[in-house]
Structure formats: C-alpha cells, structure tokens
Image (cartoon, helix red, strand yellow):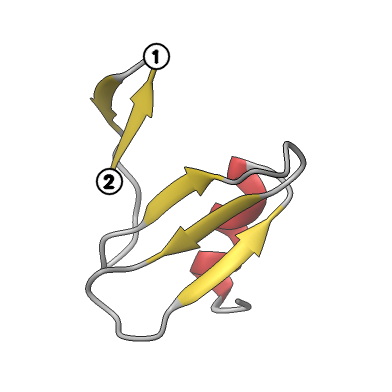
Amino acid sequence: MATKLNGSKIGLMMDLKYSLVIEATSDPNLFGFYSPDLEGFTGVGHSIEDCLYKAKRGTC
C-alpha cells in the first residue's frame, strides 16, 4: 500500500492480501477507501486506522 504525505508517496507494509487506497474527503472528519483489486470494495472511516480496521474486517 502507498500513501501520500505532503505530495510524496510513502509505502506502508500491511498484512492485507489486496491493495488498499485511502483518500481524504472534503469532510475533514472522514476518509474514503477502496481496493482496485476487489470490485465494489469501498468504505468510509473516521481515521486512517478506522479505514484499515474496516478493510481488514470487511465491514465497509
């Protein structure tokens, strides 16, 4: 998984079996996430950690 910090990509190692993209939304209290590897796999979380938790548990 890669994420952007101040416009630079940084890689993070996670124990997911698929790619996960987490993006900021226009609401500063929400993040969106999706997997380009799994059709229809999307969700919203209140933090990056919340998105990771939901993605790992499949509770999108």
Of 26 and 24, which appears nearest the observer? 26
Q: Classify mark 2: helix, strand or loop.
A: loop
Of 31 and 27, which appears nearest the observer? 27
Q: Residue at x 68, y 43 (%)?
A: 47
- The quarter of the picture where the C terminus appears is bottom right
Q: Amino acid at mark 1?
A: Asn
- Residue 57 image-quadrant placement: bottom right
Q: Earlier in the sequence, mark 2 or mark 1?
A: 2
Which residue in the protein does label 2 denote? Answer: 1
From the viewer's perspective, is residue 28 above or below residue 21?
Answer: above
- Residue 16 image-quadrant placement: bottom left
Separation of residues labelled 2 and 1 (CA atoms): 17 Å
Q: Residue at x 26, y 67 (%)?
A: 18
Residue 23 is marked as: none
What percent of the width, then of the height, locates residue 19?
26, 60
From the viewer's perspective, is residue 39 above or below residue 10?
Answer: below
Residue 6 is marked as: 1
What percent of the width, then of the height, locates residue 23?
47, 46
Q: Classify mark 1: helix, strand or loop.
A: loop
Residue most extreme to the top: 6
Total numbered circles: 2
Q: Amino acid at mark 2?
A: Met
- 35 displayed left or right of 37: right
